[in-house]
Image: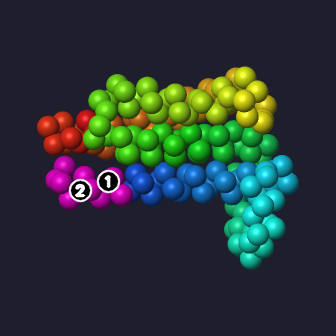
Amino acid sequence: MSRRQYRIAIVILWCMSGAALLLGGLIYYRNDAASLTLIAKLHNHWPELDRHLHALAAELPNWLVVPAMRAYAPDFLWAFALAIALILIWHRVLRWRWLALLSIAAALSFEVAQGFGWVSGIFDWFDIMVSLVAALFALLLVYFTARGQSTEQNDLV
């Protein structure tokens, strides 16, 4: 992989992270909007943006909002986006094993915080599994994207 191809791959990974974050938010917005304080504030302070997001969320395909997907897809997508972002931010500072540990710990942190009652929400073991799978998927995706790059150049692998 040339340096140019590598840079393009990194941009694509950042776009995937942003898209996963947005899609997870839209799924949650469409189904559980009333329960989110952030959405209530958005509705009060930026009603125009709230209306556009509501219209965008209403356009999601029905298979994305069936109960099984609605319950776990946002968690998967948010953990996936967080893991990719952390890897891309810290890849020049940390070794691969520390990147893996950091991204897995970060993906699991919100659910663990719910379990201890530090943040509002309901602890669920299946959410832990979904977040772990998302972090591992992100790690593998970034690893196989960057495996042709030299570690001497402070690249990902």
Residue farthest to the right? 34
How many neighbours does mark 2 have within 10 angstroms: few (below 14), some (14-19), or many (20 or more)?
few
Q: Residue at x 52, y 46 (%)?
A: 81
Instruction: Say if 55 sits above or below 93 in the image.
Output: below
Q: Amino acid at mark 2?
A: Gln
Q: Is residue 71 visible?
A: yes
Query: Magenta segment, principal secondary structure?
Result: helix
Instruction: Say if 80 sits above or below 132 in the image.
Output: below
Which residues are drawn in magenta?
1-11
Q: Are marks 2 and 1 in contact (CB under 8 Å)?
A: yes
Tag 1, which secondary structure? helix
Tag 2, which secondary structure? helix
**Residue 9 lies in the magenta stretch:** yes
Q: Residue at x 30, y 58 (%)?
A: 8
Please tell me in which quadrant of the rendered image residue 67 appears: top right
- Which is nearer the eye, 83 or 39? 39
Does residue 97 appear to the left or right of 119 in the view shown? left
Residue farthest to the bottom? 48
Circle 2 residue: 5
Q: Amino acid at mark 1?
A: Ala
How many neighbours does mark 1 have within 10 angstroms: few (below 14), some (14-19), or many (20 or more)?
some
Q: Position of residue 153 (x, y in %)?
A: 16, 43
Q: Position of residue 54 (x, y in %)?
A: 76, 67
Circle 1 residue: 9
Q: What colour scheme was applied to this rendering of the protein?
A: rainbow
Please tell me in which quadrant of the rendered image residue 42 appears: bottom right
Does residue 125 appear to the left or right of 102 in the view shown? right
Q: Is residue 30 visible?
A: no
